[in-house]
Image: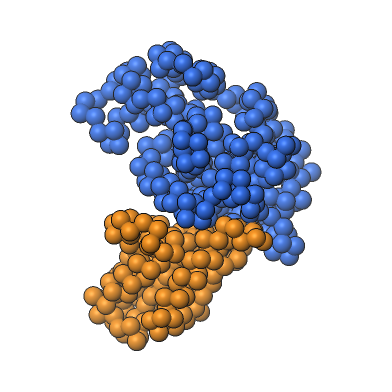
Chain colours: A blue, B orange
Amino acid sequence: MISDEILKSITNIPAFPAAALKVMKLIDDPDFSLTDVVDVVQYDQAIAANILRICNSAYFGLRYKVETVRDAVMRLGQVNVIRAVQAAGVSRFYKNKKGYGLDATKLWEHSVGVALMSQILSRRFYNCDDSRLYTTALLHDIGKVVMGEFVDKSFLKIYDLVTTRGISFLDAEEEVIGINHADLGGKIATQWNFPADMRDAIMYHHRPDLMPNGGSDNAWLVYLADQACIMMGIGLGSDGLAYKGLSEAIVKFKLRQRDFEECIMIMLNDLGRAKELLGIV
Amino acid sequence: MSEIVVGISDFKVSNNAHDMLVTYALGSCIGVAVYDPVVKVAGLLHFMLPESSLDAKKAGETPAMFADTGIPLLFKSCYKFGADKKRMVVKVAGGASILDDANFFRIGQKNITAMKKLFWKNNVLINGEDTGSNYNRTIYVNVSNGKILVKTAHNGVRELA
C-alpha cells in the first residue's frame, strides 16, 4: 500500500521548530510579554532572519533599517510578531515541495490565505484575532506537502473516482492511496506533539461535522476559510473544488452570503499586502 | 510569444499579435475572453464576485472584481482598440462550485447567473463555454488568432470552441 510508504516518510519530517512551539505556549497566557517572545526567537536563525526581513519590508515603511530582533519585535507589534514567527516557523516545511499540480509557492500561498481568512472570520464572529487558530490554519494542509508527489502519480485514478462516483477528492484520495491529506496532517501534528485541539482541527479540516461533539469552533473556522480560498482559486491545485460543502458552517455562524463575500474581499486585500509572508518560501 | 498574466479582479486588452493573455486558477471566479477577429483585439477578464452592490467603493477602485462592473469595462476597453461589439467572439470559463447539495456556498453559480443575465440584457451571445462543475481552470487567449485554450488537470489543454 502506498500509505505505508507515506507513513514511513513522515518520520523523516524535521521536528516542529522549538522556538515556534515555545511562542505558541507563551501566547496562550494572555499576559505574555513581547520581551519573552524576543528571548525565544532570537536563537532560531531562520525565524530571526525572516522577522527582520518582514519588518524591513515596504509594507511597514520604516525610515531606518531594523537590525536586531528586539527592535523588530517592538516595531511589528503583537499581532504581526506572532504572525511573522509562526509563518517563519512553518514555511520551512514547504521549501522545495510540490504536489497537487502546484509548486511550493502556491501551496504556501494557499496556507497564508487560509490563515489570513481565519483571522478575518474570527474578528467578525468574536471581535478578536486568534493566534492559535492562525497557526492551525497555516498548517491545515501540511499533509499535502508530504502526499503531493503520490497524489500527482495517481491523479487520474483519483479524479476518475471523483467524476464517476461523485465523491470528494478527500475520499477518493483515501481510496486510491490508503490515506487522505487531512488524516496525514493529523498524524504529522501528533508526531510534533501538537495540542489535541490543533491536531484535530487539522485532521478534520474538510469534515468538521465528523468531529465528536459537533466539532470545535476553530475546526469550523479553518474549514470555512479553506472553502473561501478554494473558491477564489488561492493556491488552487489539481484537486480543484471537489470538497464537500457543509451547510452547518453557515448555520453555525449565522453567516449571510453577503458577509461571506465581504470577508473574501478583505482576505484578497490582506493577501495582496502580505507579500513578505508569501516571499519566505 | 510573451505571456500577459491577468490576476484575480483584473483584466487586460491587447492587439499585439505576439501576446498571449492568460489567467490562472479559476475556481468560482470566471474568466471572460473576448476577441474581434477583424482588428485582432483580444481581452481577458478574471472577475471574482457577481454584484458590485456588495461594495460600491471597492467597485470604483477595482471594477474588474465584479461581473456587473468588470464585463462592461472589458468591452469598452476593447472598443478603444477598434473592436466592434457585433464582431466580438465571447467565450467564458470558470464558475466552479464545491460539492454542495444544499447550494449554500453558491458564489460559482451566482457568478454564472450574473454574467449570463448581463449578456442577455445586452444582446451578447456566448460562443463558447466551460463553466460549472468542480475543477480548476486556466485560460489562454492567443491575440494573433483569437484561439482560446482552457487547461485543466484532468484534460490538459483543449481549445474552447
Residue situated furthest left in the rendering: A63
Residue situated furthest front in the rendering: A254
Comparing A19 with A221, the one in front is A221
Comparing B155 with B61, the one in front is B61
Location of residue A181 in the rendering, given as x and y in whole percent from the top left corner: 66, 43
Is residue A247 something one can see in this rendering? yes
Location of residue A201 in the rendering, given as x and y in whole percent from the top left corner: 63, 36
Comparing A216 with A179, the one in front is A216
Location of residue B140 in the rendering, given as x and y in whole percent from the top left corner: 44, 67
Which residue is painted at 30% across and 56% down in the image? B57
Horizontal side, residue A42 vs residue A98: left or right:
left
Which residue is painted at 31% across and 69% down in the image? B73
Location of residue B120 in the rendering, given as x and y in whole percent from the top left corner: 44, 81
Horizontal side, residue B4 vs residue B150: left or right:
left
> How many numbered marks have been drawn onto this rendered protein structure?
0
Which residue is painted at 32% across and 28% down in the image? A55
Point out the image quarter for the C terminus of chain A: top left
Which residue is painted at 28% across and 71% down in the image? B77
Q: Is residue A188 above or below residue A223?
A: above
Q: Is residue A74 above or below residue A170?
A: above
Q: Is residue A63 above or below residue A228?
A: above
Residue situated furthest bottom in the rendering: B86
Residue situated furthest right in the rendering: A1
Point out the image quarter for the N terminus of chain A: top right
Horizontal side, residue B60 vs residue A199: left or right:
left
Is residue A112 something one can see in this rendering? no
